[in-house]
Amino acid sequence: MTDVLVLMEGIEKSFPGVHALSQCRFELRAGEVHALVGENGAGKSTLMKVLAGVYSKDAGRILVKGKEVEIHSPRAAQQLGISMIHQELNLMPHLTVAQNIFIGREPRSGVRVVLDDKTTNERAQQLFDMMRLKLDPRTKVADLTVAKQQMVEIAKALSFNSAVLIMDEPTAALTDTEIDELFRIVRELRDKGVGVVHISHRLEELKQISDRITVMRDGHYIDTVATQDATIDRIISMMVGRVIYESTPELPEVPSQKVVLEVKDLNRGDVIKDVSFTLKKGEILGFAGLVGAGRTEVARAIFGADPIDSGEVFVEGQKVYIRNPGDAVRHGIGYLSEDRKRYGLALKMDVESNVVLASFGKFLGALGWVNNIKTRATAKQFVEKLRIRTPGLQQKVKNLSGGNQQKVVIGKWLTADTNILIFDEPTRGIDVGAKSEIYRLLNDLAQQGKAIIMISSELPEILRMSHRVIVMCEGRITAELEIADATQETIMKYATQRGAIVLESKGNLTVADPR
Amino acid sequence: MDTNTAPIQKRSFGSLFRSDATQQILAFAGVIVLFVVFSLASPFFREVDNLIGILLATAVNAVLALGVTFVIITAGIDLSVGTVMTLSAVMSGVFITVWKLPVPLGVLAGLGTGALCGLVNGTLISRMRIPPFIATLGMMYIAKGLSLVISGLKPVYFNDTPAYATIAMGSIVGSIFPAFPIPNAVLVMFVAAIVAGLILSKTVLGRYDFAIGSNEEATRLSGVNVANWKTAIYALCGLFAGLAGVLMSARLNSAQPALGAGYELDAIAAVVIGGTSLSGGEGTILGTIIGAFVISTLSNGLRILSVPQEWQIVITGAIVIGAVYLDQLRRQKS
């Protein structure tokens, strides 16, 4: 029986408004590669950040090598022999590679305050030789590609010679060759007795490299299985679980066939690759995929919030050039962002101001004087129509509940006469009761002839509301499904694909190499 | 694995070159251009006395700017350096003239006052989480007020201790090489610059200075005690302000409590012209020194050409904007 390196039990962690981890459990043995999987928001990164000292747990126990410990800081974790490679790169771009790796423990010269850069560079070089990585230790991190920067993070974690190595999505930016190299290093570490935790969405990769797989869902621990005993389908079904609808799903009416929005070959760097789709009048088009799949990026690109490298957008058959949100609004496109508090509302302003925020032009008199009678009437109209619960039009928006805030944002876009609405995570942070109101609103809008794109990470929501579902993975569209063909498992399968991508173009099925 | 294709950093004369040298070259070219223009415009410009005058005029601002460089590299700012400089001068005066303590002790008092004010700044910023702009703005007023309170609103004169004035106006270099009667203040400036350069490029403090400015959160997550190091950096800035205070009062042979406010702007201007970015993570001591020379050369030349002082200020402002704009263009290209 191999030694248990780490045992986490009963771990609880909450952030304001979010119960991130409930009674979570995790066990890591020496000399194993243990994969940690789950949907967005399942709590995988959070649980490991607790272990790595970035967050402190609210409750629960952590045992390292059989001894109970408290891990209050990243340094404390390092001293216990735990190091973590984060998803977001934690590098100082202005410093060199070697300086980044040895930050906080720089080799010193005879005089303790003076640094010994020569030794720092030598040690970094030794590390790279071990990793068979061709990199000059004196290169500034800012001059490296994201892939190389990720290798630097890996090198940094390895330099601690830790007993426990946690990797959060390490292969995201790497080529196949680099991934093979990384796995070679991981296997060497495992053979030396290191315990490796590998958080990833890429299930095929995990089948290759891991010994055991732990599944989490909604902040809970679900199960741990031996990799060779588990099929990808079984893992996926553990990840999505079986969700029971509160009421019968509301089937949206069948939309018309008129195409109001067409996007062709949209490209932006590495985040949007060859995205093409159409949107019909009266349709709700669901966009499914994992965090980072590129859905928000596509929305922002169409809306003019971000520039694009190439691609065309057609509104009602006419080609349009949208270079900023103002252009988008003029063409009738509205975008309700993921983070409504940050991007959708002026929190310190009142309901009335927020409702007219996107369409002041309509309420101006001579010399730019704002016609308050008109703005009040319009705001009142939408408060009633959308059933926004507020003590008054002058109530500051930050005092409204999440659901009502979302309705104010919807009111804003309706006031601006937009016919194409992109909803990004429309019910995030909204309680169950208010959610069904938003769903009803969306259906009403679709019936009125608005065309809606609904981006959501909640699969039940996608399945309940959409006429069609587009699935994205790593910047590409991996599937376009009619609602009848869409199930949680199917969507998850296309959301986690990385190998051969299936492109559907004009009825032909082609298999393309993503590289 | 791919071979690395990124350029290898320049290492010329080790300590003083740190980041991309383009901005320093531009600033240096600026100084040369000003030199040439003013030399052609007026024969008085190139006289030895005038050149020494430029060096002397640069000294106080340059020393202030050295300290500010460290702070700006962390993406912070210190608006209090001007009045802290004055407060340090006043304390120095109190020690020497009022309490009749020996001159070296007075000098230490000046340095210590500056460092203490810097320490307070650093604590406010890193432990009480007050934004640097606000914390140092508050300190600026406090230091100014304290200068007036302690000095009783009157200048403190060093007439009884002529040794003090020699700190700035004597000439060690002149006593060894009579052909070069360079004032001590200038010597102090260059020595301080070399020390600052070594600290920035060779020591832990310098390394963490860049790290914090480049990515403070990543530095913290790497186990570095960012709060302590930030406090130390502001204290160092205060120390340089203290040194500037000693230099200035030695030059004027008095501590003038009403002076000081406004000096911080020239210091920040010097740092920025020299290529240090306000968003942190990069900067050089050499750049700061060149920036200080740009300002004083410009000032001197315009005065010789009888351009009214008001216009000098306008032109300095234009140069600061121009220098930062050029820097922005350069950054966007890379």
Image (tube, coloured by chain):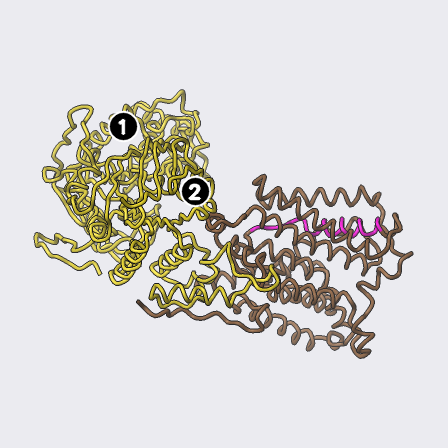
Q: Amino acid at mark 1?
A: Lys
- Evaluate if marks 2 and 1 touch, with contact meaning CB atoms under 8 Å apart: no
* A504 with respect to A183 (left or right): left
Mark 2 or mark 1: whose residue is earlier in sequence: 2
Q: Which chain is brown?
A: B
Chain letter for mark 2, please.
Answer: A
Q: Main secondary structure of the magenta part?
A: helix
Task: Specify the farthest residue to the top.
Answer: A391
Chain letter for mark 1, please.
Answer: A
State yes or no: residue B209 in magenta: no
What residue range appears in magenta? B76-95
Whether residue A352 is situated above or below residue B28 in the rendered picture: above
Q: Which chain is yellow?
A: A
Q: Which residue is mark 1?
A: A435
Q: Which mark is residue A53?
A: 2
> What's the residue at 64%, 45% (across, down)?
B121
State yes or no: residue B92 in magenta: yes
